[in-house]
Amino acid sequence: MTTRALLFPVLASLVSVLAAQTPPCVESSIGTDLQLGDDQVSSALSLGFSFPFAGRSTSIVTVSSNGFLWLGSNTDDGCCNGDLTSFLASTARIAVAWTDLDPSSSGSVHFATFAGRAVITWDNVVEYGGSSPISAQAQLMADGSIILSWQFPLSIDSHTTLVGVTPGGSTGTSRSVNFNGGLPFDSGTSATVYEVFSSGSIDVGGNVVLLTPNGQGGYSITRRNDCRFASFTRIGTGCPISLPVTLFASAASRPAIGTNFDMIVGEAPTAPSAGAMIYGTQVNGTSLSPIGMTGCALYSAAAFTQPFVVQGRYSVVTLPIPATSSLVGAFFFNQAALVAPGANPLGVVASNGGRIEIGT
């Protein structure tokens, strides 16, 4: 047997061990629904291990529906904005997206434990008075490290939001950090790090951030670049101008590996006879009027097409995405076309474009 053949199973075993030691970007097994309503806090929840922070430790947390958790027991729900003064002065907490969230309107808050790890998830919870779902997660590890993650898109339109960690009690120094554009960052001896977002300005969606104790009482904060979030971004506008065909992602679907990604083609003209989804490279809105598609533009050059059945004014088009890790981070562009006799000289209309990034 060759040296290479002997070495391969050893390397395979090492990769397996390392993979088992690396927490996922986002934990999909989110555990028990805490049944939290608007402005509510859970009962004390056992981590199953002792979580060290700032020279202290706790084995329990309490979770607020408003996007944060207390390291210990506390009944304050933190309504109704992320507040820096309270964050610094009160007891120890981790703010994942501390704002005014309302799981009584939509979504839920969950808690799960694993060997040496606990996970708290706000799953598709809406902002109070809003309608856009927000998903965020904190993973606490027995070594004191923390993973914070936020799904994309993330929009908080009417409230201040605070992200960070603190031992509270107005003790020690505090450091402001840019969680999106200012990493890596080392807080030195400060165990309090935070960022405050005014309404409409939060920009952490699609990020996974790792806070690792730095041995000085603070944290080394890095972005986990091995984590990529599945996203769909709209580009341009469709046609006809009077009521353009629209292409958007289903609210309950993301282009993640191993899933079916659902898109909606909306505002179809009356009685279109056929539809096709075009996938390929981006074209920057080249006018299609010269070929008879008046007011239409090309946003995706066809590499392949997917015919679909037009189901009426709104049609669902499903793109199956293989469970292949090498696809993570790949992106391409798409656009829907509908045969619509009489809509223009060519009898074909098109949607806006889309940018699909495959993620986990």
Image (cartoon, grey):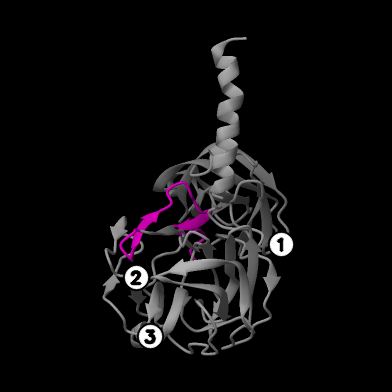
Give the mark nearer the N terminus: 3 vs 2.
3
Look at the numbered discs 3 and 2 and tell me whether their residues touch, using CB distance below 8 Å: no
Residue type at mark 3: give it. Answer: Asp
Q: Nearer the viewer, mark 3 or mark 2?
A: 2
Between 144 and 195, the residue placed more toward the observer is 144
Residue that label 1 marks? 312
Residue that label 2 marks? 191
Using the image, determine if residue 182 lies above or below residue 98. above
Query: Is 258 on the left or on the right of 183, as rendered?
Result: right
Using the image, determine if residue 68 lies above or below residue 295. below
Residue type at mark 1: give it. Answer: Gly
Corner quadrant of residue 203: bottom left
Q: Is residue 226 magenta?
A: yes
Q: Start and end of the magenta stretch?
A: 214-241
Residue 8 position in % (x across, y down): 58, 22
Question: Tag on residue 83?
Answer: 3
Query: Is 214 on the left or on the right of 41, as rendered?
Result: left
